[in-house]
Image (spheres, rainbow, N blue to C red):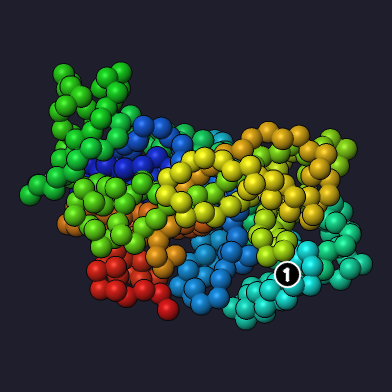
Amino acid sequence: MPSDRSPRDIAVLGAGVAGLTVALELLKLGERVSIIDSRIGAGASNVAAGMLAPASEANFGETILTEMMLEASIYWEPFHLGLEEISKLSVDYRTSGTLVVAADQGDMADLERSASYLTGVGMDVRELRRSEVRDVEPLLGSDLAGVFKVVGDHQVHNRHLIAALTRAFQNLGGNWINGLVENIAERENGIELRLSIEQSDLNSAHVPSGATTKDPLYFDSCLIASGAWSATICDLIGAESVSRNLMPVKGQILRIRAEQHYGPPEHVIRGSVNGRHVYLVPRLDGEVVVGATMEEVGFDSGQRIGAISDMLEDATRLVPSVREAEFRESSVGFRPGTSDNLPVLGRLTTRIWAHFGHFRHGILLSPLTARYTAAAIVGHEVPPWFVSCSPERFATGVNEG
């Protein structure tokens, strides 16, 4: 709810899901918000699969992250309803659940250990009998070692989500400046940003009349939400303890169109084939997203034929009808990873805030973390897990155990 005080001018650096969600929350709280980026939704958000998977994405020992993912999954229900009301656009939120599949007995042993862990933290995970598998998901291969159903995992169409967030941002009066940050200076009374701004975009609402591409812009505060590129901006403000704990994690991802006779699977399918992980995410329009590699190779955007071949081979092993599908797209994104797999949330300096580092969980976590990042900026209370994600943990060396 907006407060009685005068609204502040806040710059959000980044127009992916992390930036758009926090910008929307700040607008709801009565602030004036400008998003600064050269393109909307052009990074990892554009190539993401859109899985909302607190269960099948949970890992041993990541207790804080698991808590966050479970809370974020619950929050997605009211979030998407509110977003669709503001934007008048659907995000294709689906609650059909996930099937986690093992191709052979070695993969099955790993899957059973994971299922035991997930059950222990209260998630609804159940092994399907062989007689059930065909009824639950007819397209699965007939010679798989085992199948577990995860009820609490959902999905959303990532590109429809970006469109809805963009429309909602516009409908609530947000401002977009087409440019990239070249320098940040924190002054006594605000933030000075120097940008590379396209000349055609100098009529943006926050850009003063008569400004040139060399003139600085001024804001009361700014928030870094630049995904895998956030480290570069952290270096501009001297936050090396944060930037050295960030890294881009490359992911190659495929989009295919299910063959008309068979159609797409009914569920999200995640599997392990000879120790390699693969997932298939079906869309309502017949598209199936297949992914994804995890490569720590910097910002190398090259697409490896071997990785594409492995993904298609593994997907076909789990769902044989993939062999008949139409190939539509191969793309690369860079997940914003951190050294402890937790996002970076909260105050970086007096007037500069962080909302980045969500790694594989950006679509799932961003609505919830945006809600509390905006709350922190206006002085509201935040939960303990938010404090655990503070940038200060890198300066003190305290990481998740």
Residue at x 26% of width, y 38% of height:
181
Name the side, left or right, on which 244 lies relative to 106: left
Q: Work out which quarter of the rendered image holds the C terminus and state it.
A: bottom left
Q: Is residue 40 visible?
A: yes
Name the side, left or right, on which 124 lies relative to 192: right
Residue at x 34% of width, y 62% of height:
245
Nearer to the camera, 323 or 101: 323
Q: Amino acid at mark 1?
A: Asp
Residue at x 26% of width, y 52% of height:
234
Residue at x 39% of width, y 55% of height:
247
Nearer to the camera, 388 or 93: 388
User: x and y percent of residue 28 in the render?
Assistant: 36, 46
> Furthest-left residue in view?
188
User: x and y percent of residue 251 in the render?
Assistant: 54, 49
Name the residue beneath numbered marker 1: 107
Q: How many badges with numbers are in the image?
A: 1
As drawn, 255 above or below 201: below
As drawn, 36 above or below 296: above
Nearer to the camera, 53 or 244: 244
Q: Is residue 21 visible?
A: no
As drawn, 268 above or below 15: below
> Furthest-right residue in view?
131
User: x and y percent of residue 215 in the render?
Assistant: 15, 28
Q: Crowdedness of circle 1 by 10 Å Cα count: few (<14), some, many (20+)?
A: many
Q: Label 1: state its secondary structure.
A: helix
User: x and y percent of residue 312 in the render?
Assistant: 72, 47
> Quarter of the image holding residue 175?
top left
